[in-house]
Amino acid sequence: MIENIKINVVLGLPCTGKTTLSRKLAQALQIEHISIGDLIRDYFLNNEVVKKEHYSAFEGKQVFDEQLIIHLLNHALNEKTYDSVVIDAGPPFDKVVERMNLSINAVFFIHVSDQKRIENFSKREQQGERFDDQIKLYNSRTVLYKRELNKLYQYFDQKIGIYDLDGDGSKEVVLSQALSYMLLNNLENSEIYPNNVSAHIDLGDTEIGEIVNGLIKTSKDLHKPTYYRTDNVINTHKGKTFSKNNMLLLFKPCLSYPQSVYRYVQRKLQQHGYGIEAIVCWDKESVLKSGIFKAHFDLHYINAKWGDLVIPTENFEGKTIVSAYQYSKDISLIHKVWNDEKKKPANIKHSLWALDSEDEIIINGHIPSIIRDFEEESDYVIAFHICSKCENSMDWRFMRDKFLGSTDPFVADSKSLRWEAASGNLQIIGDINFRNNAFHLSSGPFEGYREIRVWFGDKYVQDLFKESYVKGVIDRPIEETHKLQSSLYQMTQNIDSDSSMLESILESLKEKYN
């Protein structure tokens, strides 16, 4: 049944790279790709009568009749048995969706500057792959699309929501954005949403360790993640309200934390001018069903899963790039190769580790075993949403370096959480090491924003940030040079930011680096 096929839609103006992204996205997800434009072109080549009948639409003077698109798409979807498909389309695809009763899974809109689109058109025109790559048609279709796409955008934004992509980067960068959104989309479509227990349970002045234990029990009983909003949801100091340095503090799985750890963390946060906004607990069943750790690891996971597609080979002097999951389905084998004492992986940038193995480069070989262990070896996962509570709170760099501590807990600052954990002072049960250093803290305002959304849910984030809610903030790589791509998280990790500043920070970075 066509109605049961999960449709992923890619939209944008002419020459924004819709077909290129759709093909790559379909390849990554191992699903089929259909181009509405290609269907129409193929149909026109074999049917002069149809071409004359729809010639005005072909010239970009009006949109194509939705009945023609329905006819072609029906035929394409019935040729094979599809579970899911990526379709690059344009107006009037909203009418097609309604009349065919299609099931929309995700919608992407590629935003590309006019200069970049002209460059893309010139390359296509030179290649001569499409008979309609003519400057006259490009101009007329651009005018038509700019007029019609707004209606299409509003339709899908109201129906399901749209993921906006910055298409001015390389095709690898655009694909990594789309895959990052797909991880969020898969999490949200799992329909495992955190349940706000504070809405109907009054814990009053209950000690924080008891609140955590209560959440653990509730989450296990309900087989559903639950969170508790503290009384400190509004940050005030001398009559002023703050919403600054929102970040996620994750208590990493595979370890057992006594109640005293939560009390210690709470006191340490207060000493630095921070407080706990909310606490969430995910039970093991929900963790496994939702794939939340894949969404949490984001580009770390994307590079481990699809590194061969999202990392340009020129970054490694033309050597073959092999992502961890591509290297072997045997996670134990990947782990063994990755941890061989003879060769050490190099940290290229945030989210990208590479191991030079003869003629190939293995990417992020540590991720598969970490995700497996995190998903399978713990009964629950606890995370705090924390943020600044006063004007003189410690800055983000201090919180990363001094409060949290470096990745290797044994060389971390002697008063940091990771050092205290590794030293045994917190009485955490389990093996604490470089691989599992007990705690994770968001590395900057954008990562914090995304991670809070991942663990507490989109509705929680929208309710919390309200008018300053920035739709779809993800780890959006921005190209510094043709060969080096720097993560947005890396570039903003030391910024102290009010939530309302995120969009302006993003725009200023785009102007600086593009």
Image (cartoon, helix red, strand yellow):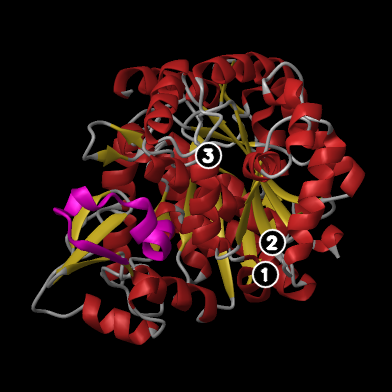
Q: Earlier in the sequence, mark 1 or mark 3?
A: 1
Q: Residue furthest left?
A: 342
| Picture quarter with the N terminus | bottom right
Toward the viewer: 492 or 314? 314
Q: Considering only vertical position in the picture, is 503 above or below 458?
A: above
Quote the CA–CA distance across marks 2 and 1.
24 Å
Q: Which numbered dot is residue 469?
A: none
| Image location (x, y in percent) of residue 153 | 72, 28
Which quadrant of the figure has residue 379?
bottom right
Question: Tag 3, which secondary structure?
Answer: helix
Give the residues drawn in magenta, as a range. Answer: 302-322
Mark 1, other Cα within 10 Å: few <14 / some 14–19 / many ≥20? many
Question: Tag 1, which secondary structure?
Answer: helix
| Image location (x, y in percent) of residue 34 | 64, 51
Q: Which residue is mark 2?
A: 84
Give yes or no for residue 243 being in the magenta stretch: no
Q: Which residue is mark 1?
A: 286
The residue located at (49%, 36%) in the rendering is: 17
Q: Which residue is mark 3?
A: 449
The residue located at (22%, 40%) in the rendering is: 484
Identify which amino acid the numbered label 3 is placed on. Tyr
Circles 1, 3 touching at the beta carbon (< 8 Å) = no
Q: Earlier in the sequence, mark 2 or mark 1?
A: 2
The answer, for residue 206, to whether it is visible in the render is no
Name the magenta segment's main secondary structure.
Answer: helix
Identify which amino acid the numbered label 2 is placed on. Ser
The residue located at (50%, 45%) in the rendering is: 21
| Image location (x, y in percent) of residue 62 | 76, 19
Q: Earlier in the sequence, mark 3 or mark 2?
A: 2
Circles 2, 1 touching at the beta carbon (< 8 Å) = no
